[in-house]
Image (cartoon, helix red, strand yellow):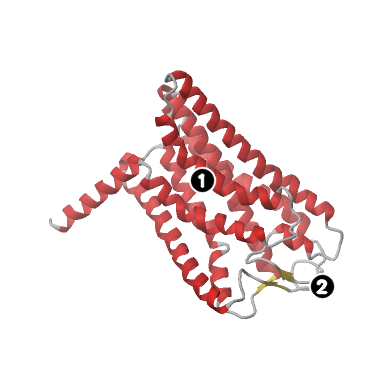
Amino acid sequence: MYGLNDSLVSEFVLLGLSSSQKTKVFLILAFSLLYLGIILGNLFIEFLVIADSHLQSPMYFLLANLSLIDVGLSSTAIPKMISDFLNEYKVISFQSCMTQICFIHIMGGVEMVLLIAMAFDRYTAICKPLHYLNIMSPKRCVSFVVTGWVTGVIHAMSQFAFVINLPFCGPNKVDSFYCDFPRIIKLACTEGAKFEFVVAANSGFMSMGTFFLLILSYIFILVTVWKRSSGDLSKAFVTLSAHITVVVLFFTPCMFLYVWPFPTSSIDKYLFIVDFAVTPALNPVIYTLRNKDMKIAIQRLSKRGHYDRFC
């Protein structure tokens, strides 16, 4: 018995993204720079929201929490992937694999709830501006975050409870750079159909349901603005375009893997680079360069720094 259950397998071998030496060097540099950008960019948003009193609003409170989750989600997979590029034999212990799966799904669940909260925030700001501060009270914002963490934990543990007791007695090669339910279930020495159904019913339903809920909410906002402004959607679309971009980027890989959790190709591991590296790196760019309040806050910060240097 090796750890958490009666499995004979004590570790898994991650096949990663590439076996070519030249490609590995490029990927190490690319993902190291991406990860550095994720850490610096998202922590900069955290700092800006905390430091600038003009950003003490519900939208930026939720954005700061989203940035924190992006750092956490990336950190579950990217550092391990970079270190594996440097090793010929890419292994992860059974316990570490299960821990990684849990954290990925907890962070993913929190992010989904935060994206719903941000959509509700935009709906309130655009469609009910006079009641915005009453509806999006500090208490409600905190409740969104708490609900996100509770949802994430329940979402992860409800699947983990099934997978942790599966017997793993033979194959231990995972054709990916990280551990996740669908590929791990494929390695179990038992009929995995019912467990794949659990993943589809849980992660698949949650991903697809949240995605369509968000898209419908944005369509509803645009239709409401269109009716009120005699066909002028430009302001609302500019406001929502960043949110829609993040939603599409985040949910496309999730729906591809979890709605049909029967990996027969390696496409999903390349798609999930978007969730672990691309989306968290783009979020600071999307929410700062395309956001007037954030750009003004950066200008105020730079002027303050310039003033402090000469005083």
Q: Is residue 266 above or below residue 285?
A: below
Q: Residues within 10 Å of mark 2 (few under 14, many from 20)?
A: few
Q: Is residue 166 above or below residue 137?
A: below
Dot 2: what SS? loop
Q: Quadrant of residue 274?
A: bottom right
For the point 42% across and 24% down, the residue is: 232
**Earlier sequence position, callout 1 versus callout 2:** 2
The span from disc 1 to disc 2 (Cα, nearest Å) is: 40 Å
Question: Which numbered dot is residue 246?
Answer: 1
Q: Position of residue 223 (x, y in %)?
A: 51, 24
Q: How many marks?
A: 2
Q: Report the front residue among 38 and 49.
A: 38
Q: Position of residue 27 (x, y in %)?
A: 52, 70
For the point 41% across and 30% down, the residue is: 234
Q: Position of residue 79 (x, y in %)?
A: 53, 68
Q: Report the front residue among 161 and 82.
A: 82
Dot 1: what SS? helix
Residue flagged by tag 1: what amino acid is it? Val
Residue flagged by tag 2: what amino acid is it? Gly
Question: Which numbered dot is residue 95?
Answer: none
Q: Residues within 10 Å of mark 1 (few under 14, many from 20)?
A: some
Q: Position of residue 282 (x, y in %)?
A: 46, 52
Classify the position of the C terminus by image quarter. bottom left
For the point 86% across and 62% down, the residue is: 190
- Indicate left or right for 4 with 30 as reference: right
Q: Nearer the viewer, mark 1 or mark 2?
A: 1
For the point 37% across and 54% down, the residue is: 44
Residue farthest to the right, as pictured: 191
- Indicate left or right for 138 with 158 as reference: left
- Indicate left or right for 60 with 9 as reference: left
| Residue under pointer 2 | 170
Classify the position of the N terminus by image quarter. bottom right
